[in-house]
Image (tube, rainbow, N blue to C red):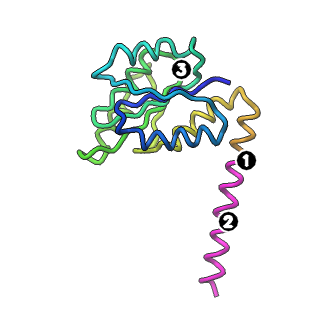
């Protein structure tokens, strides 16, 4: 199975990416995590992206706040899918990062999830990898069924308490 590359612009993004890592572990998907900044370590970030496919990666998740150029820099240097997670910062509540991540030029796409959306980024990566992995596809379907059952159980509890 291909690995998921997880790249954060700063270790302050780690709590968001721990959600990604936890989800990938629960889906039994291998991953590697790294801290590379688009601005402070551009050579390392570019080298990671350029070598990702030959190093066994199938998808890259990139999380950054503020200017949030990391996902775009990685996407510009690989043809692997890149999923951007805009991270909330003390300025602008993450809207700056969201716009920087989602507004990519034609030819360099970055799939973008919600601000601080670490869990969904991992699920999207799993869905991409599941296109060629039936066992992973089955695990995703089982998770979806489990999530559906949990919501319906909550609905039943609320209905039993309040619907007379």
Locate the C terminus by quadrant: bottom right
Q: Which quarter of the picture shows residue 30?
A: top right
Q: Check disc 3 and report its element: helix, strand or loop.
A: loop
Q: Which residue is mark 1?
A: 142
Residue 22, position in %: x, y? 56, 42
- Left or right, 64 with respect to 61, comes to left
Mark 1 or mark 2: which comes first in sequence?
A: 1
- Left or right, 117 with respect to 126, comes to left
The label on residue 152 is 2
* Circle 1 Cα neighbour tier, 10 Å, few/some/many (<14 / 14–19 / ≥20): few
Which of these two is toward me, 80 or 12? Answer: 12
* Circle 3 Cα neighbour tier, 10 Å, few/some/many (<14 / 14–19 / ≥20): some
Q: Is residue 144 magenta?
A: yes
- Left or right, 20 with respect to 12, comes to right
* Circle 2 Cα neighbour tier, 10 Å, few/some/many (<14 / 14–19 / ≥20): few
Question: Which residues, given as a range, are shown in magenta?
Answer: 142-164
Question: What residue is drawn where x is 68% and y is 48%?
Answer: 143
Q: Which quarter of the picture shows residue 47?
A: top left
Q: Which residue is mark 3?
A: 80
Residue 20, position in %: x, y? 52, 40
Q: Nearer the viewer, mark 1 or mark 2?
A: 1
- Whether pointer 1 and pointer 3 mark residues with C-beta atoms closer than 8 Å, the reply is no
Mark 2 or mark 3: which comes first in sequence?
A: 3
Q: Check disc 2 and report its element: helix, strand or loop.
A: helix
Label 2 and label 3: CA atoms lie apart by 37 Å
Residue 93, position in %: x, y? 29, 48
Question: What residue is drawn where x is 35% and y is 13%?
Answer: 43
Q: Is residue 29 magenta?
A: no
- Whether pointer 2 and pointer 3 mark residues with C-beta atoms closer than 8 Å, the reply is no
Q: Check disc 1 and report its element: helix, strand or loop.
A: helix
């Amino acid at each position: 199975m291909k690995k998921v590359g997880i790249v954060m612009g700063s270790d302050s993004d780690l709590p968001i990416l721990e959600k990604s890592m936890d989800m990938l572990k629960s889906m039994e998907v291998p991953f590697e995590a790294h801290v590379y900044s688009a601005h402070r370590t551009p050579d390392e970030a570019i080298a990671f992206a350029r070598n990702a496919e030959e190093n066994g990666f199938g998808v890259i998740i990139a999380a950054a706040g503020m200017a949030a150029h990391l996902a775009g820099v990685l996407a510009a240097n690989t043809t692997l899918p890149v999923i951007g997670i805009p991270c909330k910062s003390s300025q602008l509540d993450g809207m700056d990062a969201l716009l920087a991540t989602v507004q990519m030029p034609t030819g360099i796409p970055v799939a973008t999830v919600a601000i601080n959306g670490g869990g969904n980024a991992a699920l999207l990566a799993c869905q991409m990898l599941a296109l060629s992995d039936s066992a992973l596809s089955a695990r995703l379907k089982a998770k979806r069924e489990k999530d559906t059952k949990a919501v319906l159980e909550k609905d039943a509890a609320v209905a039993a308490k309040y619907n007379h």
